[in-house]
Image (cartoon, rainbow, N blue to C red):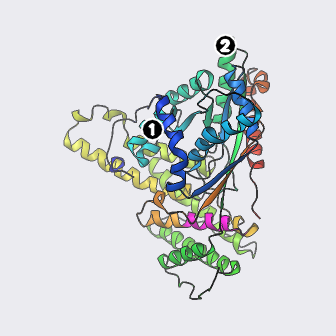
Amino acid sequence: MPNIIYQAQPPLEFIPPAFKPWFLEAVHLLLPSWLRWKSAISQIEADNVEILVDLYRQFQEGKIRFLIAFRHPKTQDPFCLGYLFSQLVPKVARQMGVSLQRPIHAHFIYDRGIPLWAGSHIGWIVSSLGGTPIQRGKADWTGLRSARDLFANGRFPMAAAPEGATNGLSEVVNPLEPGIAQLGFWCAEDLHKAGQDQQVFIVPIGIQYSYVEAPWNVIANLLSELEAASGLPGDTKVYSNTPPIESLYPRLLRLAERLLSLMEKFYTRFYHQKLPEVKNQTEDANEVIAARLYVLLDVVLQVAEQYFDLQPKGNFSDRCRRVEQAGWNYIFREEYKDIKALSPLERALGDRVAEEANLRMWHMRLVESFVAVTGKYVREKPTAERFAETTSLIRDMVTRIRGGNPFKSPPLGKQRVKITIGEPLSVSQRYPVYKTSRQGARQAVADLTKDLQQAMESLVVKGE
């Protein structure tokens, strides 16, 4: 991340959406070539695109408003959606004989922290594409008002990732945040107040990655690198062709055991944490590792929470968001709006606080990478995809511990992407229950979030 987060700064400013048609046109024009030459993605295909074509037709006719709720396993997902909008939807529309106004696009919600680690130019790019930021982990009323206005009145439909963050696993959907369902009901409410009869929908979209050729040799080499980094003897066997899968799985388990032991000792000795004993109620090594991992992640998060005086409430994802926001509050401070008026000593003290906050957030980042990891993921289906995703998560953790940038980790091989459009969920049909009372509103949001979770999970195609 840039040096800015090691120094106290004025509060994060809201980046207003400022859609530029010419810039979107340039992005759509260059995207296929960029994907071909600058990414590991070699093919993108989609199922049920006709659903999206019909939704865009109705949207452009002023009959509906809708939000695209997409799976977010990897950082490449927005590029895949851009390809869907610019290439696949127009193609299927022509095949259906449906005339759609160009461009096909969506306003979108993004994490305000992205420009901090990806570069300030990213803020200009996403703003020019019609994106609106939100600060996770707090009631960001400015960001929420912007997203709410775009949903009800924007030139395009909305798009957002209800999981809130990537989890690195194509076949596991994280618990969804209720904010997407709430936005849907706010849109229905705003349209009702304006006397408009447009229907409101949320459309689940699955995004899944697979390898063109199973990268077993690359996985084996990566395991060897991770074994060396963690002090384990590497596999000395030489394979003339692809290493047998049965030889990789024990190595993955051994590596997981080694890393768990090292991290348990690290937090016990240097952060004075007491790890609850994990009782071996089963002889299954996977379940034992999963139980130990859960205990370790809880303890690691507590190291950050104790510093920021936070109570450990909710699931790991909820807790990560609160730690992240607490860290931003220590770095981007209200009293630093006029930073030039501060004395050198005040600024130096502020920098120390910012540096410490960033170090505490480092612990949270470790947890963030593993919130969806279980002991069953590889064992249930030992596919190349599951092996690669799990091993890549471990690589990212080791890279982060060693002070490297996990966002620059190289891909393991060429990939194809499968996008699946699900059946739209009607928000308008649920709105009468929502508007009855506060309790009715809470229940409607919870029920819609649950139905969206099930819909998105149904779009995951389990690898063989």
Q: Quadrant of residue 223?
A: bottom right
Q: Is residue 8 depicted above or below 389 in this figure? A: above
Disc 2: which residue: 193
Instruction: Give the camera-side residue of 211 and 358.
Output: 211
Helix, strand or loop at disc 1?
helix
Main secondary structure of the magenta stretch: helix
In the rendered image, the vertical position of residue 329 relative to residue 297, given as above or below: above
Q: Name the quadrant of the C terminus.
A: bottom right
Q: Is residue 356 left or right of residue 233?
A: left
Magenta segment includes 124: no
Badge 1 is on which residue? Answer: 125
Q: Earlier in the sequence, mark 2 or mark 1?
A: 1
Circle 2: residue type? Lys
Rendering coords of residue 118 (x, y %):
43, 48
**What's the magenta region?**
382-394
Residue type at mark 1: give it. Answer: Ile
Which one is nearer the viewer's eye here, 14 or 441? Answer: 14
Whether residue 268 sits left or right of residue 314 in the image: it is left
Instruction: Tell me: 6 left or right of 200.
Output: left
Does residue 393 belong to the magenta stretch?
Answer: yes
Depth check, mark 2 against mark 1: the one in front is 1
